Image (spheres, rainbow, N blue to C red):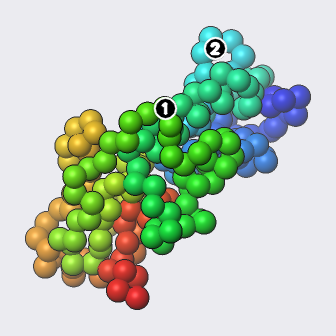
Amino acid sequence: ILVYDRELTVKMDRCVLQACLGNGFYIPKLCSMEDLPHPPASCRLCFVEVAGIKYPVTACTIRVSDGMVVKTDTPPVRRLQRRGLRFLLSVHDVDCKNCPTNKKSELQHLARFLKIGLKSKDLETFLNEVNVVDSHPCLTYYPNRCVLCAKCIRECRLSRGHPLISFVGRGFNTSLTFAGEPQSAGAVCSTCRACADVCPVGALILKTAVDT
């Protein structure tokens, strides 16, 4: 494939996102994970332009093909990425000083890269009425930090064979919920931190980390 006059040799089963990231071309992303057979493209950030396709496409959902020509930094691409990030920030509690991922948050990195402020001036802020969910014996969940990337759900499935976390609600009211009784969840989750480790925004925090 050709990315800005640089020819890349990649495996045919790779998506454009993996091909570009693996060869030094950064593409904004939040929900992507390695080797997903059906990437959700839910964050709507990894847009690129591909020659022969009229509109920008999500790089995680399109596979490379021989002779493909890709552009990662064009005005339409950046416009879509900035619009997507501003929307995510409009439903995010921007309280960086009290967040454990401050200065490490993927949202902060994306805002710097796309040169936009963390607090949107164009969109009304919409936050969940519940700021903290403390019902799980091992995890504290912050719905207003969550970007609904589903990484925790997929990581839990990989670790356990089936996810103990899922989405509940619709639209602006979508959030995470935990499966099973608290006692049984505590026995399973106490030795695993996969979901908290993969969260890019500090929405899932181990209670030991909260306590300390």
Front residue of this view, candidates 114 and 139: 114
Question: What residue type is disc 2 on?
Answer: Ile
Quadrant in the rendering for residue 93: bottom left
Percent position of residue 89, x then y: 46, 45
Residue 174: x and y, percent?
Answer: 26, 44
Q: Secondary structure at mark 1?
A: loop
- What SS does tag 2 mark? loop
- On screen, residue 166 versus residue 54, left or right, reads left
Identity of the residue drawn at 17% across and 62% down: 179
Number of numbered discs visible in the structure rendering: 2
Q: Nearer the viewer, residue 82 or 153?
A: 82
Q: CA distance from mark 2 to mark 1?
A: 30 Å
Q: Tell me the quarter of the picture where residue 203 sits.
A: bottom left
The dot on residue 53 is 2
User: In the shown orientation, is residue 103 left or right of residue 170?
Assistant: right
Residue 164 percent across, percent down from the top left = 25, 62
Q: Earlier in the sequence, mark 2 or mark 1?
A: 2
Which quarter of the rendering shows the N terminus? Answer: top right
Q: Amino acid at mark 1?
A: Asp
Location of the C terminus by quadrant is: bottom left
Q: In the picture provided, is 137 more to the left or to the right than 32? A: left
Is 46 above or below relative to 212?
Answer: above
Near-viewer residue (84 or 1):
84
What residue is pinned by disc 1? 122
Question: Which circle, 2 or 1, is nearer the viewer?
Answer: 1
